Amino acid sequence: MPALTTEFSYWKAVLAGIAEPGVKIFDFVPKARQTPERTLQVVSAWKGIESILADIIERFELNKGRCLEFGVEHGYSTAALSCYFESVTGVDTFLGDVHTRDNRDLYAETSSSLSNFDNIQLVRSDYREWTAKDDSFYDLIHVDIVHTYADTFACGQWSAMHSKCVLFHDTESFPTVKQAVTDIARKMRKRFYNFKESNGLGILI
């Protein structure tokens, strides 16, 4: 069941959206599934999504150079993305948030788990600190941070301006995330695809 929220920014966006043009959400149905050549053996709500990455890259004709990820946690998605991109930068505080179940300091553990992945760089940083100093462009950005509307919108809008394609995890389990992706799609004139499995993956292209 989707998580309920009392976040003011979310309900304000919902009400404002009534007067705005509707955003069509296209179902993303993978044409094929492919298991990456390497994955991490850790518990992750992202499991299943790794099998559609190759299809996303091919369908939307993405280059495979640079990938940026906001929200690494145990590194499952980071490892999967590294199978398809020359370099992956993972940005996270590694201290958890109000929506994570594990609030230990995960930096050392995750760094160790990903130590054999030569094309991954981990950076301990809040997304706001990172976006304030980075003006470069990426082939794909993955957003899986604290699932508030305000944070997802802020991080997601920056990501939509700095990449061809943005992925957002938890569009099915958090209405706040889905609303933020909808509003970014409207504002940035992006097409919104949604994969309903594995708690939902929003794809803005």
Image (spheres, rainbow, N blue to C red):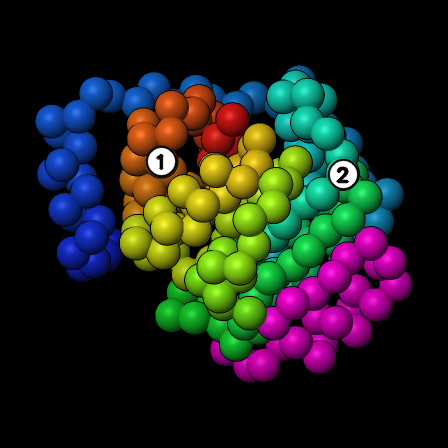
In this rendering, position of residue 102 left or right of residue 30? left
> In the picture, residue 18 is in which quadrant?
top left
Q: What residue sits 79% from the left and 64% below the top?
A: 114
Q: Is residue 141 visible?
A: yes
In this rendering, position of residue 200 left or right of residue 7? right
Task: Using the numbered discs, state the Cα–Cα distance from disc 2 to disc 1 in whole angstroms.
Answer: 24 Å
Residue 36 versus residue 146: which sits nearer the camera?
146
25 drawn magenta:
no
Helix, strand or loop under label 1: helix
> In the picture, residue 42 is in which quadrant?
bottom right
Residue 36 versus residue 93: which sits nearer the camera?
93
In magenta, the rendered stretch is 103-124
Type of the residue with mark 2: Gly
Type of the residue with mark 1: Ile
Residue 178 in the image, given as x and y percentages of width and height: 35, 40
Q: What residue sits 76% from the left and 38% below the top?
A: 65
Question: Dot 1 surroundings within 10 Å: few (below 14), some, or many (20 or more)?
Answer: many
Helix, strand or loop under label 2: loop
123 drawn magenta:
yes
Q: Is residue 64 above or below residue 104?
A: above
In this rendering, position of residue 139 left or right of residue 18? right
Question: Can you identify the residue that label 1 sits on?
Answer: 184
Numbered tag placed on residue 4 in the rendering: none
In this rendering, position of residue 159 left or right of residue 90? left
Numbered tag placed on residue 65 in the rendering: 2
Q: What residue sits 88% from the left and 63% below the top?
A: 116
Q: Are marks 2 and 1 in contact (CB under 8 Å)?
A: no
Nearer-N-terminus badge (2/1)? 2
Residue 181 versus residue 48: which sits nearer the camera?
181
Q: What residue sits 74% from the left and 72% below the top?
A: 111
Question: Dot 2 surroundings within 10 Å: few (below 14), some, or many (20 or more)?
Answer: few
Q: Could you tell me how many numbered marks the image carries?
A: 2
